[in-house]
Image: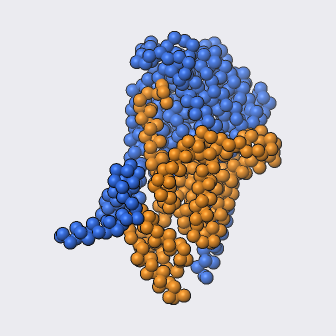
Amino acid sequence: MTGYPLGIVALLIVSVLIYFGLAHRILDRLRISDKTALGILAAMIIGSFIDIPLAVGRINTSINLGGGVIPVGLAIYVLAKAGTAKEWFRAIAAAVITGVVIYYIGSVLMTGNPGGAFDFLDPIWVYPIIGGLVAYIAGRSRRSAFIAATIGVLLLDVFNLVYLGVTGTPGRVNIGGAGAFDSIVLAGLVAVLLAEIIGETRERLQGGPATHDRPKKLLNNLTNEEYANSIGTNVKDEVKQESREGEEKR
Amino acid sequence: MKNKTYLYVGIAVLILGAVLISIPVANLALNTQQISAVSFLDRFGLSGGYEQELQPGESISIVDDKTGAVIDKISRVVYPGDETINEANAIYKIVKVKGNKAFATKTGEASDIVWLDEWDTLPAAASEPAKTGTGNSKIAIYYTHTGESYVPTDGTESIPAKGGILKVGTAFASALKAKGIAALDDKTPHEPHDANAYHRSRRTAVRLMKQNPAALLDVHRDGVPDPDFYNNEVEGEKVTRVRLVVGRQNPNMATNLEFAKRIKAYMDKHKPGLMRGIYIGRGSYNQDLSPRAMLLEIGTHTNDRNRAEKGADEFAEALPAVLNIKSAAQPGGGNTPFSSSPGEGKSIWSSIAWMIGVVLIGGAIFLFISTGSLKGMKSKVSELRKTEFANIFGLKKVSKKTSIKERRVQKEDTKNKE
């Protein structure tokens, strides 16, 4: 940054602080502790400078540590921690649907000719919005939104790799190459934010999270103290009561 | 379970519906746009439009809604709210788009596009000791649409991954090198030519940014059919003109626009006739990555590529002076900060204020939704201060597991006191 006027340096610092500050809050929503979230962000920033080459035929392919390996690893970790097999299935399905839909929008609808129903959205925003919506419809879960958006954008690169391979077009696939600022990371973060906003609004409207008739494992997540703490209420007793009632009915 | 069946059927209908409407709406979208209350959402990229280019040969004519005179032509999808600054620095705002015609109203003169004489004589880096060798006396160029070509010379408008635009970029880079400025010329292909190309070129842009360039340029050519729209003579040479494109869906937009104005002001004075104008359209063009990122349109597909190369050459020759960078070999050259114009200073603070404002307002709205009351917001903020930040900065070690209990105890204590 040497050589930039003070104002520009200030602008860059403020935008980076806001970006990582928000990212930290969002990772928090994925039931990752503060310190781990901070560690992940630091690893992403340092990892932004590390490209790991992949051997995929003649196409120059690599994956960036900060923009590819870490967010995808995080998505897999979050997936592994998912409460139930159903949540697992929904998250994976949402990721695949997201991948296909954003590919369809960005590469089929938004090619050449004017219009395209989706050209009213900037792809960088299309990715997380589709990811967040698909995941939310499929599972109403913030974590699943993160998984869908992250893996969905990753699939976009896989499709591009296939395209380059099939058509013989020269190209370079640098998965997550923009590091912490890559669309993979942006998509994951914004999708969680979106799911969070939709979720909170919906829960507010219905007067609290639905706890009735839900699998115990998911409810345990709600009673997770750290999470209860982060949403500022103590839902623990309420949820236990509800789940007991649910069991009795069954 | 009935509910589940409904849910799955609902999802299937939604997806099917989206696919179905996307086809006819694709044609409708452009014809039926009207101005709407979208300007606030624009900066989030939520209200529409994107770095869409038309097929070469298709272009939109922007006409004055009062006189009907053609002000501008562009081979991009244009939207109400887009702005264009013409060669004479008149600002027009698009109010309506119908078919391939866009109607614009003159909203003023960009009187700030002016290059003062004293800026030419200011010693570079007056406040900085001269350094040589290191620093950002580099300019980075890359190509999101690597296939763009010039029909009269290249025979076709597109050569995937090997377009004529790359040769124009080479001319650009060698003009910079001739001035002693390091050109980071990255010819990574980003095929195919679609909207996702910006997602791919983002990686190239960030790779270049790691080398700390003074400016980050995405080189394109336009697709306006009329070659004379870009043909011109500069310093007796036949060139194509250069247009700057600023994406308004990016948080740095104010600063990017200031940068564009600065370039135009300098070129208008020292290379009169070279600038086609500034177009401020939807999309972000990866300009969110740097306040010094810019998209250039060097000529159009019906221009002779040699002319475009000359245009690039003229532009590159003058650019270092705009950025106030000099060859590292020159005395006083190398790492010289380029000063802000007063306009730029203002735009930077407006960008910063905008970003902080959005975070604060967004945060407040979110807290209100999530807690449902002002009281809840207050308690959540204080909780944030007590637990989260205490934990991060280690100011006050509060274990999260005990914090709820502690707080409950505290609350009871205060109740008892009352």
Does B107 sit left or right of A99 as displayed?
left
Chain B colour is: blue
Task: From the top left corner, tell me how far across and down residue B404 is, in percent.
Answer: 36, 66
| Residue positioned 39% across, 54% down in the render | B391
Which residue occupies the foreground of this view, B23 or B261?
B261
Q: Is residue B8 left or right of residue B129?
A: right
Q: Is residue B324 above or below residue B213?
A: above
Is B180 situated left or right of B91 in this image? right
Tell me what residue is drawn at x 53 percent, y 53 percent.
A189
How many marks the image carries: the answer is 0
Task: Name the residue at 64% across, 37% down.
Answer: B204
Residue at 49% in and 38% down:
B253
Chain represented in orange: A
Can residue B270 be seen?
A: yes
In the rendered image, residue B88, in percent from the top left (x then y), is placed at: 50, 25
Compared with A50, B263 (above or below) is above
Q: A29 or B70: which is nearer to us?
A: A29
Image coordinates for residue B273, horizontal then vertical, percent: 57, 20
